[in-house]
Every structure is written in C-alpha cells, then in structure tokens.
Amino acid sequence: MADQNWKTLLHDRIPDERGQEIETFAGQVELRRQHKLDEKVFAETRLRWGIYGQRYDNGQRYDGLTTQTLVFPAGDLTKGPNTYWDAPGMVRIKIPFGGVTPEQMEVLAEVADEYSDGILHVTTRQDFQLHFVHIDDTPDLMRRLMAVGITTQEACGNTVRNVTACPLAGVCHDEAFDVTPYSKAMAYFLLGHADTQDFGRKFKTAFSGCEQHACALVNMHDLGLLARTKTVDGEVKRGFAVFVGGGLGTIPHQAKLLSSFVTEDEILPLAQAIARVFARLGEKKNRNRARIKFLVEQLGIEEFSRLVFEERDQLPHDDRWTSYLSEVQEYHETPTRQPFSLNGQAKPDGFEAWHQTNVYQQRQPGYVAVYLNLPLGDLTSTQMFALADLARQYAGDTVRTTVEQNMVLRWVSEADLPDLYSALKVIGLVEPGINTIVDITSCPGTDTCKLGIASSRGLSGELRDQLTAKLPTLPDAVKELKIKVSGCFNSCGQHHVADIGFFGNSRRSGNYLVPHFQVVLGGKWKENAGSFGMAVGAVPSKRVPDVLEAITNRYASERAGAESFQDWVTRLGKKEVKAMLEPFTHVPAHEVDASFYADWGDTREYSLGDIGVGECAGEVVSLFSMEIAKAESNHFDGLLALDEGQYAKADEGAYRGMLLAARALVRTRFLALMSDDPTQIVEAFRAQFYDTKLFFDPYAGGKFASYLFRRYENPPTTVDADSARRLLAEAQLFIEACYACEARVNGAITDLPGS
Amino acid sequence: MIPFRAQVKFFLENPDSVDGSLFVGVFQRWIQQKALDGLLIDVADYRHVFEGPGVILIGHESDYAIEYRNGRPGLLHTRKRGLEADLPTQLRNTFRLALAACELLEAETVFIPRLKFRADTIEIRFADRLQLPNLPDSFERIKDDLGVALAELYAAYPVQFAPVEQDARYLFTVGVKAEGVRDIAALVRHRQPSAQP
C-alpha cells in the first residue's frame, strides 16, 4: 500500500499513447519545478493540457484596503510569466459533444472532491471546469480522468477546443440526423493532430442537427457543421452545410458558408484542410487578429474556400477519414427503461411547473429528455454521484452537458418522471425555468478569471434570485427571453447572442471606480445564434436589476401582437432605448451610497487593481468626462444611422466617436490639442498613449487602438451594413478602453482612499 | 501515513439563525487582517448550490468552508498542503486550525445571535481515495493514530469514534462524539501542549 500511486494503479486502464503523453507532461512539471524548463514553454504546455491560471496568480490581490502580496511557499518558482507555481489554478476538462457516462461522472466527482473545492462547473463549451487546483496535483488528476476516457488535452491554448453538439442530438424532432457520432469522430480526429498544432489562436467547432434551434450555435463558431440530407439518384445521402469564420470575442463575426453540402465522408478531410490553411496563413504575431475569422475576412470567403479545397485535394489519404462511418451506422444509446407514457400517476408538489419547462418530449414515443437547471453552471460532487445513480436507474448510458451550463438526462421513460422528480428533489436539482429568463448564462468573471472586470456571476446570481421569485407572474413573452452575462468584453458569457446581454466594464466617479455593465440588446439565440446584439449603454452594476425590470416591463406593455424582442428593440430605436436607460446611469456619491462602489457578492471596495498595475497621477480630470461624452454622442449617432440604413453615416459616427475619445485622452496630458483634424489626433494619441504603451491593457495590449489606426489608415471606399456594424462595435470597445486608460493613468485603480 | 487531504467539520449549534451572506464579508476581512495561520488567498461563494460548500475561504495550506452538506451547516477545515511528519501531527494541526477559525467566528459580532459551534460532535474526512478509500479496512489503518489525536483534543472528556456508514463512493469519514464537553473554548483550553506545532 505504501508504494501505491495512481500511475501504477491505473496503468492498465490508460491507453498507452495517452498514458505516455500524460507521463511526458508529468515530467515537464518536474523539470519546471527544477527550473530546467523555460517558463514560457511550460506555460504553453500546461495550457494545452487545459491548465489555466486564475486571478491573483501573479501574487497580488487587492483586499479592499490595499494590494497584498501573496507570498507562496514555493517562492519565485513560476508556472508561466508572472504566474506563481503555488497559485491555485483552473483545470478545464474536455467533454466532446457534452456526453458523459455515469462512470465518468463518478470520477469527475472524485477529482472535484480531492483536488478542487468539491464543485464541478459546466462551461459554455460543454466542458467541466475545476477551480483552485494546484499544479502539482494535475498529473494524477489527468491519470484518473483518462482511466475513464476523459482528457484535458487541448482544452485551452491555441488548439482545437472542445467539439460541441446539440444536447438533444439523436432525440430531437427537428434534426436531419443524429450528429453525435460525427462530432465524436471530429473531436478525436483533430485531437493532437499534426495539422492542428501551429495555430495562432484557438479553434472552436460545433455540430448542429437543424437550422432553426440554437443548441449548437454554428453561426458563432470557427467551424460549424449543420446536418443536412440530399437525395442523389434516389438515395438519401448524409452531409453537412459547413460554415467558417464565426465567433464572438470582442467583435462578433457571423460565420460564412463554405459549402452548402459536404458529404459525411468528406467532413474530416475538409476540417483538416481548413486547419492547414489556418495554420499556414493565419496571423501568428498579433493574437488579437489571429482567429480564423480574421483570415476569412481578409481573404474573402471565395478565396478562403478556394485555398481550402485546393488543400483538400493535396492531402495524403488517411483511413481515419472514413473508418468511423461504420460506427455511425451502429451508433445508438441504450435506454435503461422501456418507454411508457405518463398516465395518471400521482404528481409531487412542484412537478407541473418543472415539467412545463424542464422536460422535452423525445422523437421516440414514451421517452423524454430531462434538463437539470444548474445555478451558474455549478453542482457539487455529491450531486454528481447521485446523478450518476439516477442516470443508471432512469436514463441511458450518456448524459449531456449543454452550452447553457446545464445537464440533460435523456431516454427517461415518461412514466418514471414523478419518481425521477422526487429523486432529483432530494438532491436539489428540480429548479424549473430551463430556456426561460431565469436560466442565465455567465462566465466566471472576477470570481476567478484574470481578465474579469466586473462580477458576472455575482450579477447573474442576483438576477436569477430576483427573477425566480417573480417567474410565475411574468408575462410569457418576458419569460422566454434569454439573459447572458460576461465579466468583460471577451464574451465568454455569450452576451452577443442573448436577447438581453451584459458585459462588465467600469466607470470613474471622483476618485473611485464603479463597476458597470454595458447593456447589449437584440441578439438572437435562435437559428443557431442568428444575429448579434448591439451595446446601447453602460449602467452601474447595482442598477442592472432595475434596468432589466424597466426593459422587460416596457417590452411586455408595448409589444405589438407576437412581436419578438429583437423586432421590438428595432422598432423602439436606439435613441429611445438610450433614453430608457438614462435614468439608471446616475451614480450617487460615495458618501451617499457606498454600495455602488462594491460589486455583487463582494464586500471589498471595487478595484481593477487585480487585473493590471496602474500609474498614479492622482487628480480628478473632469475635462475628460466632458470630452468623452462627445465621443459617446457621436458613436450613438452612428448607431441611429445604422438603424436607418445610412451605413456611411454610421461609419462616420463610429470613426468620429473614436477620434473624440482619443482626443479626450490626449487632452488629459496635452491640453493644447483642440484640433478636430484626424491626423493630428491620431498622431498625438499614438505618440502620447500608444507608443508609450500607456493605452495598453495588461492583457489586450494595444488591440483597441488598432481599431482607430486601421480606420484612419484605410478609409472605406464603400460601407455596407456588416462593416458599419463592425466599426460601431469596435468604436464602442475603443471608447471603453479610453475610459479604462484614463482611470488607470489618473489613479482611480491603484490610488484608492486608504491605500 | 499522511493522507493527501484531511478534513474536520465542526457543526453549527444554531444553524437556522445564520445569515450565510455575512460569511463573504467576514472571510474577506480575515484576508485583510491575516487573521489565521497560513496564506489566505480568496473567497469563493457557492451559496447558490444545494447543500454545497457554501462560502469558502481559500488558502494555500488550508481552506475554511461554511459547508451545508446533508443539511448540516458547519465549519469544514481542509488541510491541503503542508509538511506534517505523520498522521497524528497532521490531525493535530487540522484540529488546531479549525478550532482557531471556530473561535474567531464565534467572536464575530456581525452574527446576531452570535455563532456557536458544537464541540461534542465532529466529523473527520479523508480526501484521499488512493490511500484511504471508503472501506472498513481504512478505519483499521488510521484507528490508533486517530485515537491519539482525539485523546489530545478532548483530554479528559470521554470520546468515541467510528466510521460513518454512507455511500462507498463518498470520502472515508469518521464520526466523533465526546461526552461532557461544553464548547469550543473548552477544547481550546484543554488541548495538550504537545498539540502545538
């Protein structure tokens, strides 16, 4: 027993190749511990193994009074630049198509118990994440997961991330066919593939069974595959419409159609060809322009398509392209129980409300899929063990996670629903409201993410609590709305595709910073993320519940017939939307109401000190506020012009907004700059803030400045809706970055009272 | 033998009167004040999860959670990292740190009424399924060492301990009951000098 370790104990249960890869990683951990491996190399290595840094891993934490230095026992040893060895980190666990077996669920629960804090978090890519994990524990964690067929490999880093798929695949009424075996084949074909190892950025892939629903969101993926059939010579052929170059991020891009029909035997080689083109021609140095969407935009979809198919023709044959197809025919999931309808059984209290929102009638008569509404995507290891039991007892051999951070038990006999409900109630998993306004998606935000600006989880939890209490009385049109929250502009919470989205930012008020959320309205979740919302204004974080109530009340009362939320927002117009938000934008003075100066779920005075080190000039610059307001006004005029179809005017509004924001910033240092001349403004901004790197965000670097420079250097010859919309979105981010820079440079971040 | 992680839970005597949201502020203040031994890093709030870890004060060597498992709130101390020489020493340190946190919480005036932890009933868990799976044999392996550590903790108070019968997949857990001990302060007073690290 004394010599027992997980490596030897699990040796026979881990495939040789995978086991060797884990041992190589374990060796690299040891080498880095001995300073024999470069920290940058190790950082990229661990990222490729799904091991991320967490907030405060640079050894600095703002405690509400001052920034404390966290002195870790391992001293100066790092696991990456400015990332201390002992600092707790996050481990992302890949779950292809979101499918987990009861046995895998048990091991996930075990590792959450022993290496993390007992919590499993479902992500918007159907992964699981564990937080507060020590780097020393990761090799054993990987061994235990791999022994049941789960890997963390390429869950992070510039790799092919988890391949997602509709959680109802195989049981859905509207799908062309079950995409499960295809998504699984794609995930394992691309995992560790030689052609996917040299990307400039990450690469996300999704499979959907139909066009109308949102379950897989193919329109916002680097590679999206939409199931289709085609009759050729009287025979029905399976294939996929293939989309490329979609993505959210700071500026959302709708994917472009690469091919309307690719036969099933061609999807793997086509994905390989896309990977090769991306690796060969994609941006490598500037990570802010390195996603494939920028390459598609730069080349145009026609040229990109030509290059991909040319590459496809040159690929050396690989048996794996088609070998999985025999398994496709055989693929099936085995229900535990026979199908029987729900017929007169006694129903426990609360059953009806739960049944109404959380139960989906499968295509197969007598079977239903049961959604588990996980608050903020979290569940405990104890709940996971119990769920594994319930899956064995009532469902099939595969449980699914969803991109909305929930889980699904499929193949439940309808007659078992009352008993299953009662069993789920014992473990606290019968919260109704799936696909309603209370089913809020949120990224980790400032809870654990190094990039977080505001508390997305804190806000989401507050909104969820408030809305759950009101849910029975909400009008149906409001109940059906989607809310998604991101802690910063990077849209990990998918705020662009929600009816009502929020992303975190901050504003300065006197010598204080105030957490804010930008309101994003009119995104479309349906139709595989059919359209993206637009930012309409920032409000203090503590005002968001009031803002939400105002928006939803007005929608409910002014909605014309069956008018969608998107149509209502469009009809209302941005001017009116802005006016609706305006009463909520006021921030009371600190001495009047200090609660505005702390974030949700956090008693500390709000600070951005944890995400960057600022300089201290120490004086309130009210001129900046006046100047930046002009920038916002011009930007808003651009938004109105976009609504009116005046795209050139919209472009001009966005550009003027950026110029004025840049000038506002320059004037905090160089009051004499009064000119409206773009060249003078851009040159002064470049000299004062870009070349000096004062404008640089600790993580985004000079990315947002590039939006201004690009528009200045390359004025458009023609402007269409897409380009106008994009420049407006870029201008919004540039203005936000100016706010952040001013606060950083003039002291509100680090120069807090008492510090 | 030193388990990977040892945990001890002191149950709240008056759980119904506790406002769980207050722990966020209390723990954040403890980080400011460096109120406990070891490196304190962050606060994680999981109150939204059913019978979960509640609010956790995350540290490097130790975590302190107001845990709600099985509907029985209490302070769960997890000894995560450290260089103890043997199991009795690890347990001594685990008890010492947990008691220190309980004492501090009982002194917190933000809780009305004040928090009070039971001293007569504790639960010890071993988060190490490799060395100590939840099997009868595990109890035999730690019984003597645990007996030594508990005798030191409870001094003259009679104490009984036995494995908790539960799902075999859960962490190996030992339930402890002592007779006559009134409160946390009594345990702190009665801890043997040898329990000091």
Image (cartoon, helix red, strand yellow):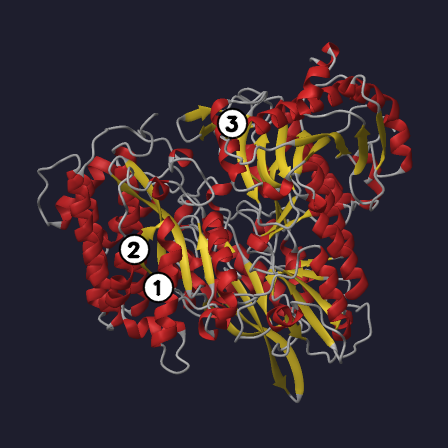
Q: Verify CB contact (< 8 Å) between mark 2 and mark 1.
A: yes
Q: Residue at x 87, y 26 (%)?
A: B143
Question: Residue beneath label 3, please?
Answer: B30
Which residue is nearer to you in this view: A624 or A530? A624
Rendered location of residue B54, percent (x, y)? 60, 42
Q: Are marks 2 and 3 in contact (CB under 8 Å)?
A: no
Whether residues under marks 1 and 3 lie with C-beta atoms below 8 angstroms apart, the answer is no
Is residue A125 depicted above or below A4 in this figure? below
Give the mark, 2 or 1, whose residue is nearer the N terminus.
1
Distance from label 1 to label 3 (Cα)?
39 Å
- Give the number of the disc on residue A642: none
Label 2 resides on the chain identified as A
Determine which residue is flagged by label 1: A550
Q: Circle 2 sits on which residue?
A: A584
Quick check: A727 left or right of A38?
left
Is label 1 in a helix, a strand or a loop?
Answer: helix
The amino acid pointed to by label 3 is Trp
